[in-house]
Amino acid sequence: MRVDGRSRVVFFALFLVLPSSVAFSASAWKPDQRVEIVVGVSAGAGSDTTARWIQRLLAEKKLIEANATVVNKPGGGGAIALTYLNQQAGNGHYLMVTSPTMLTNHITGRTQLGYTDVTPLAQLGSEFVVFSVRSESPIRTARDLADRLKADPGSLTFAVGNSTGSHNHIATAQVTRSVGADPRRLKVVAFGGSAEGVTALLGGHIDVAASPPSVMLQHVKAGRARFLAVASDKRLSGELASVPTWKEMGISAVASNWRSVIGPRGLSEEQVRYWDDVFGKLAALPEWRQDLEARLVEHTYFNSRDTRILMERESAALAATLADLGLAKSP
């Protein structure tokens, strides 16, 4: 077959283009060594449980080719883990499962590192704060609680998990501020964990608990406690579908303990695209959704871009509330 000059030019051009396309595809970033999933809490805590479920699904569903392991770096309210993560700048083999504590620690001055010092990659669920009382409480409804707070915010004691300035404390302050009362007058008792606060509530030592719904559900079902309201922007699903939101009563209070995945600062666009694809697939798995439902966690997946936007927006809102509580660091 005779090949004329024009055909030879086209063939030569294709010869030049095709190898470069193949080379580009072959050079796309992916993990080529062990992936570390860092958590700033001890084994068994919320972020650790999430990290280990992520690790299991990554392996079982072959979402990544490399092995993944969970590394616990507890201490400093997550500051130790965050510092460790950022020592791996630009390395896409390091991830961290985090929560709003990362934002509040920065706002309150517990750590110098904030969301702008890391690479947000995904949000993988939100556990909204629920307000509960024991069954014998004279506070029967969320409106009763709002009226008590408006009249005298210091007349009730609230149990919150982990520390002052936590998302549970934030939710309590938001309700108080929205009804026109001073959040600094609140009587808040911070327990080491939400379960401890629930025990104090059921024992009659605390008036109201602001907590994750998962730690209260069994007591509500047993008739020992009742849900009053949830700090979400809309009605939740499943077991919480009958619980009213504060928003329905015209009270502005939205607070959740979301689980996000971040990487160290300086990740490349290719690395971010890779993890966007992985976590998008993970969030779509039926097993992932079933686990969230079992733990009363709402499915709120965001990709890397939207996770950064979320953190920016929430950081500003949290800073305002923590300033009201006198807990925000000075500029």
Image (cartoon, grey):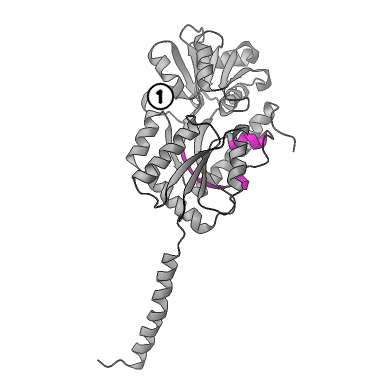
For the N terminus, the quadrant is bottom left
| Residue type for callout 1 | Leu
Say above or below: 310 vs 76: below
User: Residue 130, how many percent across, how many down?
Assistant: 49, 23
Label 1 sits on a secondary structure element that is: helix
Q: Which residues are magenta?
A: 102-124
Q: Residue at x 67, y 34 (%)?
A: 110
Q: Position of residue 33 (x, y in %)?
A: 47, 53
Is residue 120 visible in the rendered image? The answer is: yes
| Residue sitting nearer the eye, 127 or 101 | 101
Q: Dot 1 corresponds to which residue?
A: 240
User: Residue at position x 37%, y 38% from top?
Assistant: 288
Q: Look at the image and say whether residue 113 sits in the magenta stretch.
A: yes
Q: Position of residue 247 (x, y in %)?
A: 51, 27
- Work out whether 22 lies above or below 202: below
Q: Quadrant of residue 185?
A: top right
**Which residue corresponds to the image point at 51% horizontal and 22% vertical from the top-left?**
211
Lateral position of residue 21 relative to residue 95, left or right? left
x 46%, y 50%: residue: 34
Quadrant, the C terminus:
top right
